[in-house]
Image (cartoon, rainbow, N blue to C red):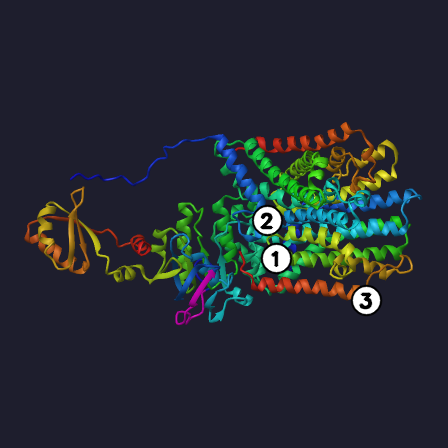
């Protein structure tokens, strides 16, 4: 009879070591969990899920309004009414998207710096660039989902609310790539700005309030000023209405001016200016954000 | 109480933060100056609605006070230094009152000066109107401060809840549902302003001066009592 | 007044418990952190021990009134500690959290703590407290520039400034270097000798063993043992003592030792020493030299291997 004694003491890990890419994936996944409050108790879920529910609810309301109008007045009459569309949704939902970004964005960056946890990330095969890029990608994914899900609900509602859904789909299939593109423009913009502001403070409260102040205050201020100072100068001043920048891109994609940008002189500028301006407000803050993190060491 | 008051003043008044709040507070002054410079712009009604009610009372005052007042207790809880205060032989009401007073001391001058400058410029130096606007702004600061000091103590998501209150409740629902306005601090602050200078401002559908004064006292006292109660009952981290 | 300038405590303080914890439980949802714990704390030094997650900090927080109990009562100096601010004139608490007001200078912090606790002659009290913790040179620097050990010491100064009768310290030695540990031990011994009551939670068993008259061992939210650690050890009678014996002929001596009634087992360890497992060490102490003489074996050394707080802790945590 033979016997074996097994050494069950400390054993070294002999499996694969996946390196930086695995680290990036982990930070990305963790970023999504933070943004949605997953694995962190009920209270951490309230704000992000309430915001997503509010946005989805808005899409649903728009769909119901359009459906009711068609049911009561008929398709022909309904077509003459100014019913809410995908473009209008983005104009109205923009404020909620900004508030969502202001509330949730700072959670991804502020806490790690405040609690010193960032250094634990950086002792791994991860650089500051990896960390901030993964966090940015995670928040972009969440904001894009928040932008797209209500639009999908609205699209499904509009098509199913039509007496002939197949005809509706055939006539409006282009709305899908449009709202996807417009949603991505909105989410890239809000993600980058929210994370940039969060990178300047370790207190989430200050970052959130500053972001909301930035979005909410600049609009009436710049619009009011631009109406005062008419002409090209006034138009350029109105470009600094931060809530309107992605909405102009939305208007270009859908080919119609939304109510939110209806009175803003900048809406009349050429498309390449408006898109370039949006791009500048994504790329430049993104570069500043990257710059602030790239030199971090443990 | 003075020690806690001074401590809180130091905690809340870093130059960067005060600077940002100052920038926010100066905006309505600039707009008032612009409006005045051009006779062919908004009417008095539009000015009151846009600048005084929406911008000043609806955005700047609550945001400035939110940032400051939620941090009065919020920072202590986050940093786990609140026990330094609660483990002292001081009645809880003194701790809460000191925090509230410090928040008002920091936010009040910024906001009230902004309101005074805005009104003084817009109403061509007429002091009745200026005092009415300043009183409305001061009442708003006091009410918002008591609400947000309590919120900073009661919730880890104080800023989020506060922002939703400002943007959704006061900014959105109160516009469409009359009953919601009765539960809106902004409504009573603006009512106080109108009540103090009826001959200068047009009459709106708003509460009376007496109701505004009573509600200011009730809101301030009520949230202060809630903060004291919370301090007595909570587990201090 | 005593040698370090601290006034003494009232007489008769030894008669009644300073802290009474009676049937205390605390749960968080479905997690029971502390389960039906009852004990008294008398003047002197009491060490609160337990593995991580045992419930020590929760217990300390309930004893200081920072947390409420789910069941049971905690009284300090005969009064309920919860929602009783005037009681804090007599209590000094140092929590486990190391955060301080970074923007404050050390002296400012201690002064503020003294003012909050109603100290009258504030400058003298602050000088004394800072001198006790040996930070006079750094008192005018901002606390954000302090090392971890310095922050702990300044926090301790803030805890001592109002000269409390009861001190509750949660992990006070975190970040302290060896010299500071020695200094701190002397300080606690002096304070205890004056009749003060000190409750000390620590992971450093060796120091608690040297300092504490009484030990409270908490395991899984329950009070596993209380009292002097040697008395606790003696009470663990299902665990025989391990005694190591060095002699010139261990096997020869072992043959005789194994016959003793007080001996459970004997083995020879790899170093050639004899290790005896005995439930009656007193009897072994008497019989062993007699046996050695009878067998003509030279005894060199006899030492207990598990007569320490660490062993007691280990046995109680395992069970």
The residue that label 3 is drawn on is B210
Closer to the chain start, of discs 1 and 3, is: 1
Closer-to-camera residue (C130/A224) = A224
The residue that label 1 is drawn on is B153
Q: Are marks 1 and 3 in contact (CB under 8 Å)?
A: no
Task: Say which residue appears at 49% left-offset and 54% top-offset.
Answer: C156
Q: CA distance from mark 1 to mark 2?
A: 23 Å
Residue C10 magenta-highlighted: yes
Quarter-of-image position of residue A130: top right
The answer to whether B57 appears left or right of A121 in the picture is right
Which chain does the residue under circle 1 lie in? B
**Residue at the extreme top of the image, as rendered:** A272
Q: Position of residue C35 (x, y in %)?
A: 41, 63
Residue A296 magenta-highlighted: no
Q: Is residue A210 visible?
A: no
What segment is highlighted magenta in the picture?
A: C8-27
Closer-to-camera residue (A266/C126) = A266
- The N terminus of chain A, quarter of image: top left
Which chain does the residue under circle 3 lie in? B
The residue that label 2 is drawn on is C104
Q: Position of residue B235 (x, y in %)?
A: 53, 60
């Amino acid at each position: 009879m033979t016997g074996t004694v097994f050494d069950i003491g400390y054993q070294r890990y002999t499996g694969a070591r996946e390196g930086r890419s695995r680290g990036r994936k982990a930070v990305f996944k963790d970023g999504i969990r933070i943004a949605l409050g997953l694995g962190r108790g009920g209270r951490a879920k309230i704000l992000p899920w309430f915001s997503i529910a509010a946005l989805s609810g808005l899409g649903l309301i728009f769909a119901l309004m359009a459906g009711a109008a068609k049911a009561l007045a008929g398709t022909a009459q309904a077509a003459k009414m100014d019913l809410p569309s995908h473009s209008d949704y983005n104009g109205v939902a923009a404020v909620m998207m900004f508030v969502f970004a202001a509330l949730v964005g700072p959670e991804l960056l502020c806490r790690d710096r405040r609690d010193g946890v960032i250094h634990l990330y950086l002792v791994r095969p991860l650089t500051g660039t990896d960390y901030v890029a993964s966090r940015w990608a995670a928040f972009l994914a969440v904001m894009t989902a928040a932008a797209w899900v209500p639009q999908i609900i609205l699209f499904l509602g509009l098509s199913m609310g039509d007496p002939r859904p197949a005809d509706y789909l055939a006539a409006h299939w282009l709305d899908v790539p449009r709202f996807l593109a417009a949603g991505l423009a909105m989410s890239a913009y809000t993600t980058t700005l929210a994370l940039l502001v969060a990178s300047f403070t370790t207190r989430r409260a200050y970052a959130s309030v500053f972001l909301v102040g930035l979005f909410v205050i600049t609009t009436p201020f710049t619009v009011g000023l631009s109406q005062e100072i008419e002409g090209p100068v006034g138009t350029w001043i109105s470009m600094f209405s931060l809530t309107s920048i992605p909405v102009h891109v939305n208007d270009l994609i859908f080919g119609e001016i939304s109510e939110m940008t209806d009175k803003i002189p900048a809406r009349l500028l050429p498309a390449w200016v408006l898109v370039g301006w949006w791009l500048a407000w994504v790329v430049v803050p993104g570069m500043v954000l990257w710059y602030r993190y790239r030199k971090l060491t443990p | 109480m003075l020690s806690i008051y001074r401590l809180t003043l130091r905690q809340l008044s870093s130059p960067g933060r005060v600077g940002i709040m100052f920038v926010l507070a100066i905006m309505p002054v600039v707009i008032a100056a612009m409006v005045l410079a051009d006779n062919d712009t908004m009417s008095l009604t539009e000015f009151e609605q846009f600048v005084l009610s929406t911008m000043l009372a609806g955005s700047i005052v609550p945001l400035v006070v939110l940032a400051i007042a939620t941090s009065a207790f919020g920072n202590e809880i986050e940093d786990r230094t609140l026990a330094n205060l609660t483990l002292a032989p001081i009645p809880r009401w003194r701790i809460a009152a000191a925090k509230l007073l410090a928040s008002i001391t920091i936010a009040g001058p910024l906001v009230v000066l902004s309101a005074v400058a805005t009104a003084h410029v817009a109403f061509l130096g007429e002091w009745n109107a200026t005092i009415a606007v300043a009183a409305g702004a001061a009442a708003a600061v006091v009410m918002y401060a008591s609400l947000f000091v309590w919120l900073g103590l009661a919730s880890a998501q104080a800023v989020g809840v506060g922002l939703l209150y400002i943007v959704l409740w006061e900014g959105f629902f109160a516009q469409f549902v009359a009953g919601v306005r009765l539960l809106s601090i902004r409504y009573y602050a603006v009512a106080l302003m109108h009540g103090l200078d009826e001959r200068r401002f047009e009459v709106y559908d708003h509460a009376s001066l007496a109701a505004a004064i009573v509600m200011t006292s009730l809101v301030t006292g009520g949230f202060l009592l809630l903060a004291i109660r919370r301090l007595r009952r909570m587990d201090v981290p | 007044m005593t040698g370090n300038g601290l006034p003494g405590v009232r007489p008769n303080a030894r008669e009644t418990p300073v802290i009474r914890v009676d049937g205390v439980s605390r749960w968080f949802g479905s997690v029971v952190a502390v389960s039906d714990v009852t004990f008294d704390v008398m003047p002197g030094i009491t060490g609160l021990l337990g593995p991580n997650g045992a419930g020590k900090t929760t217990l300390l927080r309930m004893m200081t009134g920072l947390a409420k109990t789910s069941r049971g009562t905690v009284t300090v100096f005969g009064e309920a500690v919860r929602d009783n601010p005037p009681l804090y004139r007599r209590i000094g608490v140092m929590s486990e959290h190391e955060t301080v007001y970074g923007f404050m200078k050390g002296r400012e912090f201690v002064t503020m703590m003294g003012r909050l606790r109603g100290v009258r002659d504030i400058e003298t009290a602050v000088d004394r407290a800072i001198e006790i913790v040996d930070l006079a040179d750094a008192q005018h620097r901002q606390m954000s520039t302090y090392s971890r050990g310095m922050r702990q010491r300044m926090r301790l100064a803030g805890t001592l400034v109002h000269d409390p009768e009861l001190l509750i310290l949660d992990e006070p030695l975190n970040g302290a270097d060896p010299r500071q540990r020695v200094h701190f031990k002397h300080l606690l011994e002096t304070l205890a000798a004056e009749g003060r009551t000190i409750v000390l939670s620590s992971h450093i068993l060796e120091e608690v063993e040297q300092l504490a008259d009484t030990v409270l061992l908490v395991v899984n939210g329950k009070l596993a043992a209380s009292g002097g650690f040697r008395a606790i050890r003696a009470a663990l009678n299902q665990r025989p003592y391990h005694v190591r014996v060095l002699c010139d002929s261990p096997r020869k001596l072992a043959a005789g030792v194994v016959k003793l009634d007080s001996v459970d087992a004997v083995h020879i360890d790899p170093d050639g020493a004899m290790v005896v497992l005995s439930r009656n060490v007193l009897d072994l102490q008497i019989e062993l030299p007699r046996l050695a003489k009878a067998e003509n074996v030279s005894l060199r050394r006899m030492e207990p291997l598990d007569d320490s707080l660490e062993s007691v802790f280990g046995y109680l945590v395992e069970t």
